[in-house]
Amino acid sequence: MQEIIQRYNIKAKKSLGQNFLMNESVLNQIVEITSIQDANIIEVWPGFWALTTKILFNKPQTLTLVELDTTMIDILNDRIQLGEINIKWIEFEIINQDILKYTPEYIDYKVIANIPYYITSPILYHFLYEVPYKPLHMIILMQKEVWERIVSKKSSVLSLFVQKKCTVTEKIFVPAKYFSPSPKVDSSVLFFEKHEKYNEVNDELFLAFIKAAFSNPRKKMINNLAQFWYDKDYITLMLDKLDYNQNTRAEELWIEDFITLIKSI
């Protein structure tokens, strides 16, 4: 990897939040999390293609790379021309586009991504709520601040909108020293697996409800909801049935509690 960086004089762009994963062992572990062979794989922001070569080795049916950095695309095309990256027998496509404007063509596909802190939540929302066909699996390498909120013992808007669509498992801890340049915090690889458990609750209603519940996290949840025209007495009654009291804050409820509350309204 260092040879490639030196040959092309690759420098991470702060404007894109780039931090390149340099640890060979972690790269190998990432492609073992889900079955890649014969699958439709979308790799988001592949950087200088260290993980791309691992994916190709596992022979996906298709591999779509969505990359905003044209410099990295030029490097990949050069390495393909030199024969360093073999794309024979694989339907291969490079898309130079903002990932938040990209819509997958496949019904069944998997996403693999190493994404910067500032765009993690928008990307999760995009794939879980905006695109017509949701990914079967997502393998996402993200910084500590985000993954701790997703797997926290306290609920948040982020953890809830993720949990409505998929189960989440932390797979690989990745120290900051494994990146170039090294970020200020450690990272982790999370595995997102689509489920259909809460489809009976409308997405738009669910999102509106949890945003209202967390509108002022320091306040009691019933007071937050009352500001958005939910009946305070009725919410209090439903909380009692769930063994919560009227002093409950939104962060104390689990996804199943919110689903029950919403279905009861």
Image (cartoon, rainbow, N blue to C red):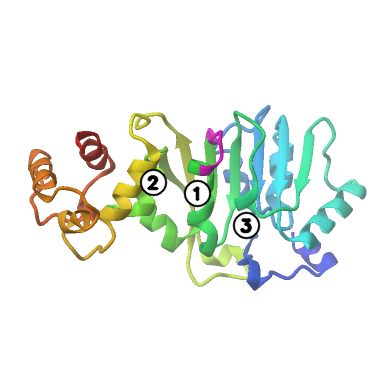
- In the drawing, what numbered circle is on residue 25? none
* Label 2 or label 3, whichever comes before in sequence order: 3
Q: Position of residue 227 (x, y in %)?
A: 21, 58
Side (left or right) of 91 relative to 38? right
Q: In the image, which is nearer the foreground, mark 1 or mark 3?
A: 1
Q: In the image, which is nearer the foreground, mark 2 or mark 3?
A: 2
The reply to whether residue 17 is in sight is: yes
Look at 68% across and 27% down and name the residue there. 38
Residue 134 shown in magenta? yes
Asked whether 245 or 8 is in front, the reply is 245
**Residue linked to disc 2:** 161
Tell me the kind of residue under disc 1.
Answer: Leu
Residue sticking out furthest to the front:
229
**Residue linked to disc 1:** 124
* Label 1 or label 3, whichever comes before in sequence order: 3
The secondary structure that most of the magenta stretch takes on is loop
Dot 3 lies on which element? Answer: loop
Look at 42% across and 63% down and name the residue there. 145
In the rendered image, the vertical position of residue 250 relative to residue 191, given as above or below: below
What distance separates the C-alpha of mark 2 from that of mark 3? 31 Å
- Asked whether the beta carbons under mark 2 and mark 1 sit within 8 Å of each other, the answer is yes
In the rendered image, the vertical position of residue 173 relative to residue 178, given as above or below: above
